[in-house]
Amino acid sequence: MNYEGIEKSRLFLGMTAKELSSCLASLDANEKKYKKDDVILYAGERTSKIGMVLSGSVTIESNDVWGNCTVLSHVGQNQYFAETYALLGEVLLVDVRANEDCSILFCNIKNLLEDTKKSSPWKEKLLKNILIISSQKNLVLSGRSFHTSPKSCRGRLLSYLNATSLQTGTREFDIPFNRQQLADYLNLERTNMSKELSHMKDEGIIEYRKSHFKLLESP
């Protein structure tokens, strides 16, 4: 098994080459490839596996029976999904969809929880890393709640763009969403959101081209 570079990922951080090999074998690690728009995991099913994006990206979506879609988060290369569902064994309330052609490494966390008799350094490191990943995910989800709390379209856009600027440490950055995904993420109607972006550009608040944004000083 050859997964170049994963030893530097957050999930396996701190493991020696030997520990990583033992970890991957114990968790029945396997790689799967998906095409853009493929559904990787469906709401309503259960999973015992955590997914790590080796290449490409995926989106976490909430889709209801009436056809409404809400994008909850974007998961890029070397990031993870389904770790909480895998640990708790709960039914998925979200769909995981390939945002582009992607390759996913699946690790069966259930094996880790069931084998409690044997102790090894890699298990302690893995559990610590999963805790940190879950904590980071909580920050992402709480951030979305913060962005969707303003009542106005402009308020939601400014909240999201300002937070992204703070996280990247620059006023000029790329966002991981296309227009429809951004509208879904902020619980906005796409046409109204696009109009508001145009107004903000005309007023000298922002500049943008596709997914590239620049925050300007107030006129």
Image: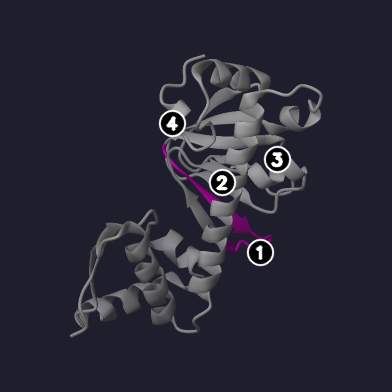
Q: Residue at x 66, y 34 (%)?
A: 49
* Residue type at tag 3: Ala
Q: Which mark is residue 133?
A: 2
Q: Quadrant of residue 159?
A: bottom left
Q: CA distance from mark 4 to mark 2?
A: 14 Å
Disc 3 marks which residue? 86
Look at label 1 and name its amino acid.
Trp
Against 16, residue 146 (above or below) is below
Tell me the distance, in whole angstroms, between the alpha carbons under discs 1 and 2: 32 Å
Q: Quadrant of residue 172?
A: bottom left
Relative to the observer, which residue lies in front, 157 or 110?
110
Q: Residue 201: horizontal and vertical position, in percent?
A: 23, 76
| Mark number displayed over residue 66 | 1
Quarter in which the C terminus is drawn: bottom left
SS for callout 1: loop
Amino acid of disc 4:
Lys
Q: Which mark is residue 99?
A: none
Residue under the image location 78 percent in, 25 percent down = 115
Is 57 magenta? The answer is: yes
In the image, which is nearer the foreground, mark 4 or mark 3?
4
Crowd class of label 2 (few under 14; some 14 to 19; many from 20; radius 10 Å):
some
Q: Which color scheme did the rendering employ for the protein?
A: one colour
Q: Give me the C-alpha separation between circle 4 and circle 3.
A: 22 Å
Question: Would residue 178 appear left or right of 43 to someone viewing this image?
Answer: left
Amino acid type for the residue under numbered disc 2: Ile
Q: CA distance from mark 4 to mark 1?
A: 42 Å
Quadrant in the picture for residue 85: top right
Spot occupied by residue 142 in the image (x, y as percentages of width and height): 56, 65
Per the image, the residue denoted by label 4 is 8
Magenta-colored span: 56-71
Check disc 4 and report its element: helix, strand or loop: helix
Q: Which percent across, then down, holds residue 33?
A: 50, 28
